[in-house]
Each structure stands twice: as C-alpha cells, then as structure tokens.
Amino acid sequence: MPTRTSHVWTTRDGLKLPVHVYVPFGMSYENGLPKVPLPTIIYIHGGPWVGVTHWNSWFHNRNFQFLANRGYVVINMEFRGTTGLGKTLMNAGDKQFGEAMHYDIVDVADWAKKQGIAHPKRLGIWGWSYGGYAANYALGKAPDLLPLCVSMYGLGDLLGFCKSPLLQGDSLWITRVGDPNTPEGLALLEKHSPLTYVKNIKSPMLLTTGSKDQIVPQEQSDKFASELNAAKKQVVYFFYPEEGHDYAKPESWASFWAITEYFLHKNLGGRKESRKTDIESGNFEVMFGKEFIERID
C-alpha cells in the first residue's frame, strides 16, 4: 500500500494549512516524503465548502491509492475557504476564488518542489466540482506552473454560473464568491472566471462531466471545452449522458480512469496498463479528443 502522511505548510500570508501526501509503495523515507522527486498530482476537493469530510472517505482516497500505485505522489490539500478548520480560515476565502484561494494552490505546488516531493516538470492538478473550476483557472492564471489539468464537472464560466436562475439571490454565493447584480461583482466574477484566461493556457487539459448534473450543468464544460478547442489548445473532453454530479456507475469510473491513466502517462510519465476493455465498458460521448482516446490500447 502507498504511504499516507500528514504535513502542515505555510501560505505566503502566514496561514497554516494541512496536506495529506500519498507516496508510492517503497518510495518514502520515515517522514513519509519520497526519496527522490516524483511525478506529482495536486488534488483539489469540491465545494469548496466540504473540507475535512473527504479525508478518510474511501470514495475519494481509493483514487489517491490508485494514482500512487501508478507511480504518482498525490497531494490532497486544503485551502482557505474550506470548512472544518474554523471560521477564520473559511472566511478568509470570501471573494477569493481567483485570488488567495488560487495562490494557495500555487504555494503548495512550490512547497512540494522545495520539499523534494514533486518533480518540477511533472506536476499536474486534478479536481472535481469546485476543484475542477480551480484546475481550469490555474492553467490559465499560472500557465507555466502546471504541465496538465484533469477537471471533473468543473466550472468554466464563473460569471455565467453565478448569473443563472439557480443562484439568483443566493446569499451564500453572493457573500463567498461575488454578486452578479452589481458592477463590482460582475467585474470580480469575470476576473475570476477560467474563460477569461483561455488564451494563456499552454498545457493539455482533460475535462469530463455528466449530462444529468444538477449542480454544475454540462453547458459549463461544453462552453469551456469549445473555447479551448477554438483557441487551438490541447483538450480532451468526454461526457456521460446518464451520470450526474459525482459518477455513480462503476463502468463510468473504470472508463474515466482508463482514459485519464493514459493522459497522465503521456504527460507526466507514470505507469499505465492496457485498459481498452474498461474504456469500452463506459457509456460516454466524446466532444473533443476522439483520436486521442481511440489510440489507447
């Protein structure tokens, strides 16, 4: 089994934040950090207001175990704006989606490199829901930091999402993210939207979502992927017509990881296995990257 250890790191403005580091079997010292820098994936959880509860959830950490088995270090990080670590830390994320919360990701990436955990040129980001948004945003806002992104049911158009009827008058989103009904709020949401930075993106992106998602509508991924494709960025985008927010069917997870495993192998160099039958088991449709997926053995 991979080694999992807990560590504390310090943000640029002095906040103390926890991380869990998963290291492939046989590659860690007694302190739980790798003997040599390894391909590394930073995981960003959803919400962002669902912190801590996923730390020991098998639904989540089975994925970290799988990635460590393939040769990757996984850094499961927390960030300001999360829950479970006190109101001060949660409130520090107010209206900071594209500012301090983003820089927490930048800073943990730098921490991982300075600690000798992450190979500096083989460092990716993966997240779902809010984490998918954060991954989408990070590749445009910090284009030289991360060689790839895996985004599951993530926001691409933050402004459009906050203007949707679903969120009109939602005091939580207005307080935490921004108010689309004021000039200042509109400007902030546009500034913090991944769509605003598509032209800056240099690294390949893998996007996926479910057509029955009632939290982050599929149109968010459709629009973002289409903008990436129009800008001639490297994008693989596939969706599951029968899935919602967080996939439920084992075949969906098997096919997702079969495709993603190959995507990570091509861009970060981890191990892969022959997974053609797993891909064929999934009920998904491909919008962009069909040739990439068809090449997987």
Image: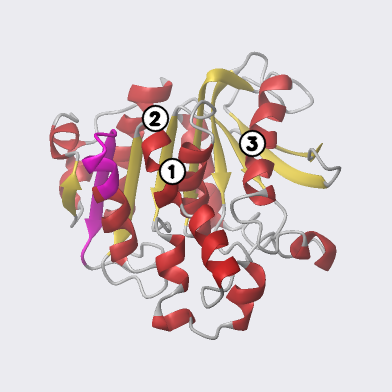
The numbered mark at residue 246 is: none
Residue occupied by mark 2: 203
Seen in the picture, residue 38 relative to 42 is either above or below; the reply is above
Could you tell whether 23 is left or right of 296 in the image? right
Gap in angstroms between the C-alphas marked 3 and 2: 16 Å
- Assign a secondary structure to mark 1: helix
Between 103 and 237, the residue placed more toward the observer is 103
Q: Earlier in the sequence, mark 1 or mark 2?
A: 1
In this view, the mark in front (1 or 2): 1
- Residue 281 position, x and y percent, is 18, 51
Amino acid carrying label 1: it is Tyr
Could you tell whether 156 is left or right of 284 in the image? right
Seen in the picture, residue 55 relative to 161 is either above or below; the reply is above
Graded by Cα atoms within 10 Å as few (under 14), some (14 to 19) or many (20 or more), the crowding at tag 2 reads: some
Quadrant in the picture for the N terminus: top right
Image: magenta residue range: 227-241
Residue occupied by mark 1: 197
The reply to whether residue 270 is visible in this rendering is: no
Residue occupied by mark 3: 106
